[in-house]
Image (spheres, helix red, strand yellow):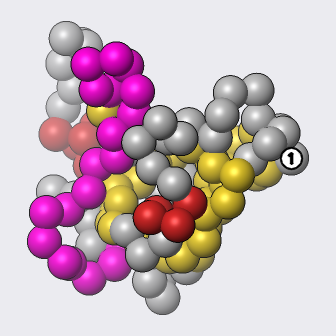
Amino acid sequence: MSDQISFDDFLKVDVRVGRIVEAENFPEARKPAYKMRIDFGPDIGVKKTSAQITKHYTPGELVGKLVMAVVNFPPRQIGPVMSEVLTLGVPDEDGEVVLLTPDKDVPIGGRLY
């Protein structure tokens, strides 16, 4: 377990629900990955990212999927892609990423609380 944080610290992390609108192979990545564009609604817009999620997902099944992502990290260069958000997931029994998704259809842009 990590060090304890205050509730105010938690509120600094802006986690939102977005809908993947584009997903494609990312052949320039060191490990197998996809480049994605995720729509977070009119207040945040469409953001770019990459994710090493090729074991459980194909680009075709990602498009339209709701995902959770941190939207207030500074952009980070990952090869030729400027990643603007961190898509969240958890490891399966083999350490492969399984995306965090709402279990109901919810409006994009909603903040985690």
Quadrant in the picture for residue 40: bottom left
Please state the horizontal and vertical placement of residue 82, each as a whole percent of the image.
76, 51
Report how many numbered discs are placed on residues in the image: 1
Q: Residue at x 35, y 60 (%)?
A: 67
**Residue wearing tag 1:** 80
The quadrant of the image that shows the C terminus is bottom left
Who is closer to the viewer here, 49 or 110? 49
Residue 98 vertical position relative to residue 48 in the rendered view, above or below: above
Q: Position of residue 80 (x, y in %)?
A: 86, 47
Q: Is residue 107 left or right of residue 12?
A: left
Query: In the picture shown, does residue 93 fall above or below 10?
Result: above
Q: Is residue 20 magenta?
A: no
Main secondary structure found in the magenta portion: loop
From the viewer's perspective, is residue 74 above or below residue 96? below
Query: From what the image shows, is residue 49 above or below residue 66?
Result: above
Task: Say which of 113 and 68 sits in front.
Answer: 68
Residue 61, image x and y in percent? 44, 64
- Residue stretch rendered in magenta on the structure: 91-109
Disc 1 residue type? Pro
Q: Is residue 47 visible?
A: no
- Quadrant of the rendered structure where residue 98 is? top left
Would residue 57 be seen by someone viewing this image from the given angle? Answer: yes
The N terminus sits in image quarter: top left
Does residue 92 belong to the magenta stretch?
yes
Which residue sits at x=70%, y=42%?
Answer: 76
